């Protein structure tokens, strides 16, 4: 029955309670939730009051056969979004609409572009550390259809990469079974599983960026729209096609918010202009150079005394209600040991899963690293506020040899494949440049510059130096933690909390 003034709408299908100040909201299209939140910002009425009015006016398309669930977004909601989000650019409204997506069978190259497109999205990705990829599961760039000889080279190489992966597993598993004997109380089955996981972890370094992956993705309307724009502006047709697939599916949930999604002219024209400029680079590079792991160092490490002073001032402002001038004058009288004592008070109570006080976001660090593609994919997924400048996939910065491959006597076999990968990439760079990055392996290094606050470094060091962390990214943050310990001892003393 349609609600009337004498029969007010039943809100219990849509909110968890009718008389409390906090309530959950459900059974409504995402765009309707976003628009009613927007109404709240311009009206004294509550969310429940605005919802009741829309139901009273039969604006939500409520179907009794659907158990009282709103099955379609309203025209009124659509018009509101057209005016305030699309027309006036009030994109914050779009943050209240959320979509969850499954994305399957995209390349590792495209998954990285997707995960880097907007930091507000959340991802869980298929892990090559725990699962064994299947033969033939890789992406073939559509541009190769214009050069069948290059396509044949590409396909042959992808098949060779999987052959090499299988051969490395065959060599690693017997070695690891002996080198890592069962732990006390560990069953034969659990021991075998542990050994296989470590073998997967190291053998995967010969898999390429064309290898298929899958992920779960969640994002709000604003972040998703920006994500689509970035993907549409990619140099890779796979990422552009992925954007249109995502747009189609997201539009079923938040249709109005994705109107007018198109490639970004600024990104396209800026990239074109910068890449046309001639750059005189040194003739030396690290192509063909083998590394045991990542290299990393801080760039322009903040002055220790200034860092202590800055954070001590923030602590006084936060906890003692001082103005900036008062805090500055007070800290000016402190010795280094006094400042370190205050910082120790602020950090020493941290436990495994705690985060430092937010004021530690005021201190920023810059570091550069040359890391394997395998390491890079872990780094980009699990940061909580790091800003990256990163180079494109390349063979010019060397590659990592996993430690167990060395110990198992498989180094020569491994390196011969990497040398072949370098030749294939060089060939494709000449005849089909857009296909070349798909032949870069997980072992090849990528240049990354990162900016992170001390708050973020506490999160990363704590997470990535734990015994459970994968050895490659563990080495990266052990390097950085050691450098911090040498230069900023009081600030990093409590960063490792999972040991």
Image: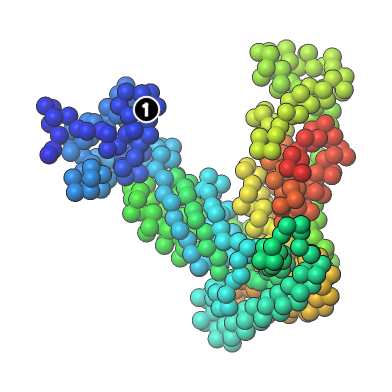
Vertical placement of 480 versus 176: above or below?
Answer: above
Residue closest to the eye, 398 or 49: 49
Residue ID at (41%, 45%): 98
Vertical placement of 310 versus 417: above or below?
Answer: above
The quadrant of the image that shows the N terminus is top left
The image quarter containing residue 386 is top right
Vertical placement of 414 versus 224: above or below?
Answer: below
* Residue 282 can be seen in this image: no
Dot 1, how many residues are within 10 Å of its Cα: few (below 14), some (14-19), or many (20+)? Answer: few
Q: How many marks?
A: 1
Residue sitting farthest toward the front? 185
Residue ID at (84%, 20%): 338
Residue that badge 1 annotates: 41
Residue closest to the eye, 303 or 349: 349
The quadrant of the image that shows the C terminus is top right
Vertical placement of 176 versus 147: above or below?
Answer: above
Residue 147: give x, y in percent of width and height. 55, 84
* Residue 341 can be seen in this image: yes
Residue ID at (19%, 32%): 9
């Amino acid at each position: 029955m349609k609600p009337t003034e004498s029969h007010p709408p039943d809100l219990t299908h849509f909110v968890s309670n009718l008389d409390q100040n906090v309530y959950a909201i459900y059974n409504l299209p995402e765009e309707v939730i976003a628009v009613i939140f927007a109404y709240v910002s311009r009206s004294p009425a509550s969310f429940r009051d605005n919802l009741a009015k829309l139901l009273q006016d039969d604006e939500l398309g409520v179907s009794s056969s659907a158990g009282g669930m709103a099955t379609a977004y309203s025209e009124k909601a659509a018009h509101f979004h057209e005016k305030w989000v699309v027309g006036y650019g009030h994109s914050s409204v779009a943050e209240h609409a959320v979509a969850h997506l499954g994305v399957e069978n995209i390349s590792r190259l495209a998954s990285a572009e997707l995960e880097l497109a907007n930091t507000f999205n959340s991802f869980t990705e298929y892990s090559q550390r725990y699962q064994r990829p299947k033969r033939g599961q890789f992406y073939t760039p559509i541009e190769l259809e214009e050069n069948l000889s290059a396509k044949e080279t590409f396909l042959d190489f992808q098949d060779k990469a999987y052959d090499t992966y299988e051969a490395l597993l065959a060599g690693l598993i017997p070695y690891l079974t002996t080198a890592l004997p069962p732990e006390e109380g560990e069953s034969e089955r659990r021991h075998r599983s542990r050994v296989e996981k470590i073998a997967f972890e190291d053998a995967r370094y010969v898999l390429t960026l064309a290898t298929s992956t899958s992920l779960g993705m969640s994002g709000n309307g604003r972040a998703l729209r920006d994500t689509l724009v970035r993907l549409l502006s990619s140099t890779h047709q796979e990422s552009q096609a992925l954007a249109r697939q995502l747009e189609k599916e997201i539009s079923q949930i938040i249709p109005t918010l994705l109107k007018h999604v198109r490639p970004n002219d600024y990104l396209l024209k800026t990239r074109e202009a910068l890449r046309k400029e001639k750059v005189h680079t040194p003739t030396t590079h690290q192509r063909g150079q083998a590394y045991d792991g990542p290299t990393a160092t801080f760039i322009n490490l903040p002055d220790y005394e200034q860092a202590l002073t800055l954070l001590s001032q923030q602590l006084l402002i936060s906890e003692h209600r001082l103005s900036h001038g008062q805090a500055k004058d007070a800290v000016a009288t402190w010795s280094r040991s006094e400042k370190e004592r205050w910082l120790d008070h602020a950090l020493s109570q941290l436990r495994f899963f705690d985060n430092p006080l937010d004021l530690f976001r005021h201190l920023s660090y810059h570091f550069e690293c040359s890391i394997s593609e395998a390491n890079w994919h872990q780094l980009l997924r699990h940061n909580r506020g790091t800003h990256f400048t990163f180079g494109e996939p390349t063979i010019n910065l060397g590659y990592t040899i996993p430690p167990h491959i060395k110990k198992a006597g498989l180094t020569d076999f491994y390196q011969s494949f990497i040398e072949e990968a370098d030749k294939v990439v060089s060939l494709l760079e000449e005849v089909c440049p857009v296909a070349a990055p798909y032949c870069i392996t997980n072992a090849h290094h990528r240049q990354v510059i990162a900016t992170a606050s001390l708050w973020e470094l506490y999160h990363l060091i704590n997470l990535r130096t734990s015994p459970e962390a994968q050895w490659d990214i563990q080495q990266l943050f052990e390097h950085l933690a050691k450098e911090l310990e040498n230069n900023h001892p009081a600030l990093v003393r409590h960063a490792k909390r999972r040991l």
